[in-house]
Image (cartoon, rainbow, N blue to C red):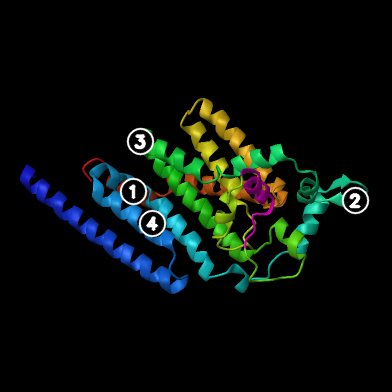
Amino acid sequence: MPAPLIGIETLNTSRKGGLLVLLLSAAYLLLSYVLIGFRPEQLVLVGLCNTCYFLSDTTRRFITGFSIFVVFWILYDYMKAFPNYNYRAVDIAPLYHAEKLLFGIPFQGKSLTPNEFWLINHNALLDVVCGIFYLCWVPVPLAFAGYLFFKNRPLFFEFSLTFLLVNLLGFVVYYLHPAAPPWYVQQHGFAFQPLTMGSTAGLARFDAFFGANVFASIYAKNSNIFAAMPSLHSAYPVIVLYYAIRNNSGIFVQIFGVIMVGIWFAAVYTSHHYVLDVVAGVCTALLGMGLMQLLLARSPAFNRFVARFSKLTAPGA
């Protein structure tokens, strides 16, 4: 095809893509308003996506690649409109007793769950360290995805799709088995209270130490407090570590390994998750990674989808 015709075709494709982005943005804002009401962060998301798409070829390719993470965020946010406790009974007491049976810690003549033990035996150093680890749960996967986008594009798509798949698996379990976090039992006992607000739990000590509202502002936006099992906080670092190994990321493999274990411990120490939640999160990550490898190995249609999506982020796309 002659060069002028190629340029015209590229321009037409770009215009169609721009129109699609604007229509999707309007549809997202309208649907969000209907489902969960207007929130300032919705405008931030739309503004960021549109700015990146229209600013330059590089930023357009970048936001197209990261649209996988945008889909995750929107789905997570929309869970507010469909609380899982409306569809299944919430597991409160049975999960607590199972945790104590399997992982109970003898202390002063009683058997305590690990959460209860650390609630009594917490200290300022662990409060700060665990808070730092817990802040890594989304920034680290996003930063690693950004690195892969520029350094290893094929692995970036595999990592991103695995991240989305693991979240979808976790969301399915949330609706099949709503579960209360440890802090809920500590604050409300075993009675089901559907309109309970999210809590910073042990992370409040981090906020108090620094005189800030870091975690208070995060957990005020919690989509559903009865979505404790599996712990996706515990799943994300497993995915990052696996793909860091696949990418031969050197010392970052060790760093990600430390972050992974740190997040696991912090989840229990701060009473946000039981050990059982953490184990379920790790299993969800392993299942998602296994399914992704199976799709890549067995499904030509899925491989064509990945190749087509990858082409959209190629220079000149």
* Amino acid at the residue labelled 4: Val
Please rate how many residues cluster around mark 4, counting C-alpha atoms within 10 Å: few if below 14, some from 14 to 19, many from 20. few
Among the two numbered marks 4 and 2 on one chain, the one whose residue lies closer to the N terminus: 4
Q: Residue at x 64, y 54 (%)?
A: 200
Residue that label 4 marks = 44
User: Magenta segment, which residues?
Assistant: 198-210
Instruction: Give x and y (percent) for residue 213.
Output: 58, 51
Residue that label 3 marks = 150
Residue 109 or residue 85, whichever sits in front: 109
Q: Residue at x 88, y 46 (%)?
A: 107
Instruction: Give x and y (percent) for residue 68.
Output: 40, 52
Residue that label 2 marks = 110
Judged from the image, the secondary structure of the residue bearing numbered disc 1 is: helix
Q: Are marks 2 and 1 in contact (CB under 8 Å)?
A: no
Relative vertical location of residue 97 with respect to residue 130 in this rendering, above or below: below
Please rate how many residues cluster around mark 1, counting C-alpha atoms within 10 Å: few if below 14, some from 14 to 19, many from 20. some
- Camera sees residue 279: no
Judged from the image, the secondary structure of the residue bearing numbered disc 3 is: helix
* Amino acid at the residue labelled 3: Phe
Question: Would you say the magenta stretch is mainly helix, strand or loop?
Answer: helix
Residues at marks 3 and 4, CA–CA distance in whole angstroms: 24 Å
Residues at marks 4 and 2, CA–CA distance in whole angstroms: 49 Å
State which mark lies toward you, 3 or 4.
4
* Amino acid at the residue labelled 1: Ile
Which dot marks residue 63? 1
Instruction: Give x and y (percent) for residue 133.
Output: 60, 40
Q: Residue at x 76, y 59 (%)?
A: 186
